[in-house]
Amino acid sequence: MSAAARRRLITPRQSQFCARVILWAMMAATLAVLVFIVLFVVKRGLAHVSWEFLTGAPSLSGKAGGVLPMIVGTLAVTALGVALATPLGVGTAIYLTEYTREGRITKIIRFGAECLAGVPSIIFGLFGFVFFVLVLGFGWSILAGGLTLAFMILPTVIRTSEEAIKSVPPSYREVALSLGASKWESIVKVVLPSAMPGILTGVILGVGRSISETAAVIFTSGSSLSKVIPTSLFDGTRTLAVHFYQLAREGISADKAYATATVLVLAILIINVTAYAIMSRFMKRYR
Amino acid sequence: MRFRLPEKVVERSLLLVAMSSVAILLLITVFIFREGGPLLVQVGLGNFFSGAWDPQHDQYGIALMVVGSFAVTSGALLIGVPFGIACAIVLAEMAPPRARSILKPAIEVLAGIPSVVYGFMGIVVLLPMIRTHIGGPGASALAGSIILGIMVLPTVIGISVDALQAVPRSYREASLALGATQWQTIRRVVLPAARSGIVAAVILGMGRAVGETMAVIMVAGNSVQMPHSPLDSVRTLTANIALEMGYAAGDHRAALFATGIVLFVIIMILNTLANLARGRLKKRSVVVVTLAATAADLVKPRAKPEEQ
Amino acid sequence: MLPRMRTRSLCTFLLLAAIATLATACNRNQAGGETAVTLAGSTSVQPFAEHWAETYMGQNPGITINVQGGGSTAGVKAALAGAADVGMCSRELKPDEAAKLKKIVVARDGLTIVVHPSNAVADLTVEQVRSIFAGRIKNWSEVGGADHKMTVVTRENGSGARGAFEELVMNKESIASSALVQDSQGAVRQMVSADAGALGYVSHGVVDASVKPLKIGGVAPTEATLTAGTYPLIRPFLFISKGEPAGAAKAFIDWILSPAGQALAVKEGLIAVQK
């Protein structure tokens, strides 16, 4: 059968229909995987998530008790990471969008950020282990973990901030400048506040990435199971994701493992939905 | 007169901040090479890439791990790329705005789920399935590929969607005006025009798969062996680092950092390739030529069926 | 005006975060007064050490005991480098290690060969186990079981369990490269419990109903045979330190060796050390 003849058997309309069905089916399959994972974990874990679980200390290697020290540890490394990555990321974005034309320097910076975004978390872990834990002598600590995470989420913050700043209409800047503001003033008082929701989205996504990270923090914050809440930046901590890994791997307690996973997955869900809600409201404003 | 920060100072300090990501990248490079480089020299690049891995007898060769990473990654792309591009087409071209506003964040949640959770799902759901329905021990290159195939989806989808959306609306309108259906427009005009961006998406997805650690450790079995079928267990470069890092000292540790160097170099090459591919996207001339060619191609065979 | 306030509140937040960072950083110096003991090493010993530490801390407020994993070899290194007060090791020390370190046997452990509960094989000799792990025996029918391909599960290089297994069973032979490698006892147990053809080795203390322990040369790993020493695969759990342990570390180790500490070990499936 010649190609032309075959072409006649299926009209463009039919092939359009087939393509649509297949593509939507593939989309549905992808979503089904997501829904399956979330439901699978939450269904088995939710029953074991209680107030005592969220606010209690673990005992018997995590077989009993709660996860409060891990929650605090996770929040601590995440907060540190975000507090460091935000000024760096927003600063970079301001420089890229407001202070320079596309040229060699922006190319280098963009390339650097893109490469950093592609660096696997295990490499960040190795680096953080050598640089922060050993060379700088921080030990397995919240500080080492937070700094490593800051490096890891920096590209995310840069990219979203850049997009947010770019989407602020030029007229805003022009008005500010025409009122006698300096460039820097116009940025701080007009551009940044207008871009804030977009920047916030990047930060929130960075928070999500930090919370779910395992490989980078296990080498930098350690995996010591602590019954007490960390009080110093030099305390080691086991983050929730690492705790889940240990529970699941060591087969310590399936119930606690599912409960920990439920906390993680729900946190990620809430974070993503929040980020998206802020972003879509932000985009609507400037459309 | 109020004090004003001199603009030059602001610009300089912002430039300094902006160089931070480059500086971090350099810092990472320096330290990974510092730890692993000497061993690479000592063992020799040739031996490192061809020899066997037996740390107890001071043999450090990562050939089988390179094979393992390659096997798992190509498997992941085989699964992740078709689904990823399909989802990207639906998101960028077909879905009505309201559906898109649900689908897009859903895909992003997929990216946010911790890799340890993926690995765990692999252990409790996927491995038993492979064991009972296909055979083998379950923990295998196949299991790793499937889990990674799901994990690369958000990367592939995100960048492909960007690439598709970057194709000017006028291209679609021109094609539709020529009488093409939406699918013909997508296949013959939009996809070719977005080709380089999609290539970048695939390359970055590949980088994601090569670099993933925890999920792979949990499902791929980690045997240091030459896989003869997808059901054989393999160890990836990343798994090698994470598995043995805790125990390693001296040359063994250096060898794991050297494994990190190899991983890092692979990732850098992939990033550069993706960057090149994406750079090409911006050169509209290439796109226009593709468009002209595909439009011509579109008109010719369509002439006959339309006459009937 | 609203956007302006937002920037300001963000700045305030960042400032506060910075202050909090500094404040907690200073905390470190003040924490010096409290007594802390750091243990690091074998992941086999870790859960038991955590258990000991938990009970001990419950009885002795004011003492903090940190238990880090890392593996036996890492435990040796940590003790040598002084990174940990006490290293944990679940295999015999190598001669060069033993020369530099003080070791205390805190308990003994029976390395148990486990298979899927449905497996008909109940007894193997050490030689058979060696042949299986070396890859010479590949099917359960060769050792009197059903015609089912074997899935051999081992631990990663450097782990104490693997070190002890190689020493006690392998007799300088290498474990076949086709063996699956898992990085914890729980993972080995999980793998074996889910695969009808699997076998692996774990501590006697972590054996549960999901797997079946095998007799070795006719001797089942039970509390009696382990204590009597008739079960062939027994390894020590060591606490090691550079020089004689002192202060809080010594008190902790003394408590572990006391009847109360040993009773806890026995309850968890380990073997008590006789004084």
Image (spheres, rainbow, N blue to C red):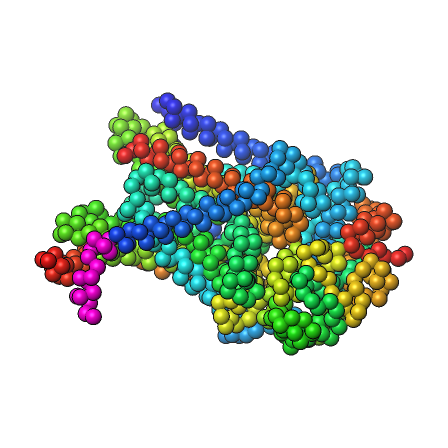
Q: What stretch is highlighted in magenta?
A: A1-16
Residue B235 sits in which quadrant? bottom right
Residue shown at 40% from the left, 34% from the top:
A277
| Magenta-drawn stretch, dominant element (helix, strand or loop) | helix
Relative image position of residue B107 (x, y in whole percent): 41, 46
Quarter the C terminus of chain B occupies: bottom left
Q: Is residue C142 left or right of residue C274?
A: left
Q: Is residue C123 left or right of residue B177?
A: right
Relative image position of residue A21 (x, y in whole percent): 31, 51
Query: Does residue A27 lie above or below C178 as drawn?
Result: above
A11 magenta-colored: yes
Q: Which residue lies furthest to the right in this view?
A: C275
Relative image position of residue A60 (x, y in whole percent): 72, 45
Query: Does residue C139 lie above or below A96 as drawn?
Result: below
Query: Can residue B158 be seen here?
Result: yes
Relative image position of residue C53 (x, y in whole percent): 76, 45
